[in-house]
Image (cartoon, rainbow, N blue to C red):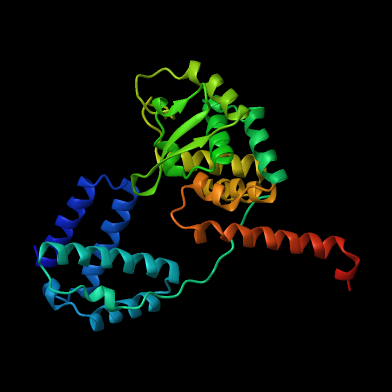
Amino acid sequence: MSELADGIDRYLDSLRQANVSPHTLRNYDADLRQFVEYLTPPDADPPRPMNIDSLLLREWLGALYQRGLDAISIRRKLACVRSFFKFLLREGTIATNAARLVRTPKAPRRIPSVPSAEQTNILVEGVAADTLARPHPQRDLLLFELLYGCGLRISELVGLNLSDFDQAERWILVRGKGRKERQVPYGSKAASALAAYLPERNSADPALFLNHHGKRLSDRGARGIVKLYANLVSGDPSLHPHSLRHAYATHLLADGADLRAIQELLGHARLSTTQKYTQVSLTDLMAVYDRAHPKARK
């Protein structure tokens, strides 16, 4: 095994010990293996970590651009390599973090696609109607009520345990990115869905959401449930779990919620991340103006 590959194994082990989410671990593993593959000449070992400089890293970034990767993907891969080099620097394998000398590609500002309140309610009410002969309709309804009613990330949703719910006060303990915890309130519809689901849940597993084997529902399984209902109820295959999180934030903002409060509810570390929803609201306002105001019409 090369020195570089051995360093990656040690780095990934350190992430496991830090309880990094399986999703993040898989991404970092894949990104770093691809990084080593690029740096490895035919029939030779990759360079030693101490011999990787900023010029070689810029060459690697250029190859990513040539493959057609967008700026968001390249930024993520560079962040992964920077974190790896920071680990090597901390353990004394390298003297400097060359990845810090490489400029981060500028990402375009994207306004998230957000379903309207009417579209979202049609979807959730369609799930509640239970017309698809699904094996666990109560579970599916609760899943949607928490995604839209609490703005949870899909990883946060499937990570919920029964013990995370304060049913008397209607609060949920949510574990977000970096294992940061926050308290999120839930409403009467989610409370009703929870009360209907719990009696049919026959398992000693601590997880709230279970699959057909009686074990914790996976991230992939939850995404599949959302995709199924999005296709069959809404007829919109573009809807995904994060669409409901976007809808939660945007609809709160449209109804007058404070931006700082929304930041806390979503678990954003930076207010600038939450501020993208103000752009969505402005876009919606312009659309309303264009449709309704006589001066907007040609």
Residue 43 visible in image? no
* Position of 72 relative to 164 (above/below): below
Residue 280 visible in image? yes
Split into 4 quadrants, where in the image is the C terminus?
Answer: bottom right
Q: Position of residue 202 (x, y in %)?
A: 42, 17
Q: Position of residue 90 (x, y in %)?
A: 15, 63
Residue at x 37%, y 64% (from the top left corner): 76
Looking at this view, name the residue that lies furthest to the bottom: 55
- The answer to whether residue 60 is left or right of residue 237 is left
Split into 4 quadrants, where in the image is the N terminus?
Answer: bottom left
- The answer to whether residue 34 is left or right of residue 206 is left
Viewer-nearest residue: 113 or 92: 92
Q: Where on the picture, by quarter, is residue 43?
A: bottom left
Residue at x 31%, y 46% (from the top left corner): 22
Viewer-nearest residue: 135 or 32: 32
Q: Position of residue 261 (x, y in %)?
A: 55, 47
- The answer to whether residue 52 is left or right of residue 156 is left
Residue at x 33%, y 52% (from the top left corner): 24
Q: Position of residue 120 (x, y in %)?
A: 66, 43
